[in-house]
Image (tube, rainbow, N blue to C red):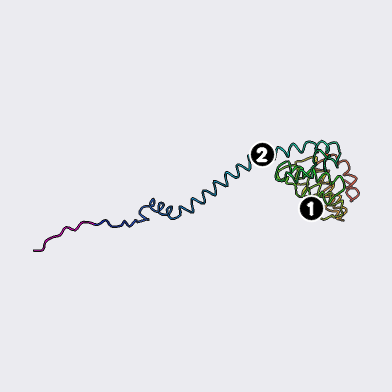
Amino acid sequence: MATETNTPEVDQPHNYDLDANPLDSVVVAYEKNKKILTTALTVLVIAGVGFFGYQKWYKAPNEEKASSAMAMPQLYFQADSLNLALNGDGKNIGFAKIEKKYDGTAAGNMARYYEGICYMRMGEFDKAITALKGFDGKGTLLAYQAWGSIGVSYMEKGDKKNAIEYLKKATGNAADGMITPMYLYQLGLAYEADNNAAEAKAAFLRIRDEYPRSMVARDMDKELAKLGVLD
């Protein structure tokens, strides 16, 4: 009779059914990709710290310095001392240097707008156009004034096509009863110069009918009469 031998059981390796246990799947995936994940998290942390440091220790103080630098040129601008406003007085820098030195700040952006207006009023229209195109006025009323000033500068250069393009943009805020009719008038004159009487009439009629209390409305009957509109 054969003797039954008791063979000790040997632990067999576990075969995980990853579909049966989702948690095991996550653990295995993490172990396989731990190094990549750790590196990515480290990069994100460093980027976050770097951004916070940039905001706190560089951008905020730079904004303050830029705002402070704007004070004297703005006073010169209000006094119509355009050269001093633009180029500085030897002690205080002007808009032209502020927009370069503090590029990326809100004050630097505003300096670019003032720079363009100064150049336009000084008759340097190419420089005015370049500066004003670099100004970011998105979402503000100054955007319309910048476009209008670009249009006027192009008109002064004899470039009627670009003048009309920017003056049309400048008249896009129908709710503004001061700036919009002023640039509608400029737009009408630009259309006249471009021999487009129909569009000139349309611009002048908008002023007469939509902005009768504006400063330029009193000239509309005369302008429309020249174009054959007598009522």
Foreground: 171 or 73? 73
**Residue 213 spot, x, y in % from top left:** 83, 38
Residue under label 1 = 165
Q: Secondary structure at mark 1?
A: helix
Kindly indicate whether the residue at mark 2 contacts the one at mark 1 (C-beta within 8 angstroms): no
Residue lying at the far front of the rendered structure: 91
Left or right of residue 54, residue 196 in this image:
right
* Residue 211 sits above or below residue 31 on the image: above
**Residue 72 spot, x, y in % from top left:** 80, 36
- Residue type, numbered disc 2: Ala
Residue bounds of the magenta highlight: 1-9
Residue under label 2 = 60
Tell me how far mark 1 sits from mark 2, CA to CA. 37 Å
Q: Residues within 10 Å of mark 2 (few under 14, many from 20)?
A: few
Residue lying at the far left of the rendered structure: 1
* Residue 101 sits above or below residue 33 on the image: above
Pick the quarter of the image with the N terminus. bottom left
Left or right of residue 37, residue 219 in this image:
right
Pick the quarter of the image with the C terminus. top right
- Which of the 4 quarters of the picture holds residue 177? top right
- Residue type, numbered disc 1: Glu
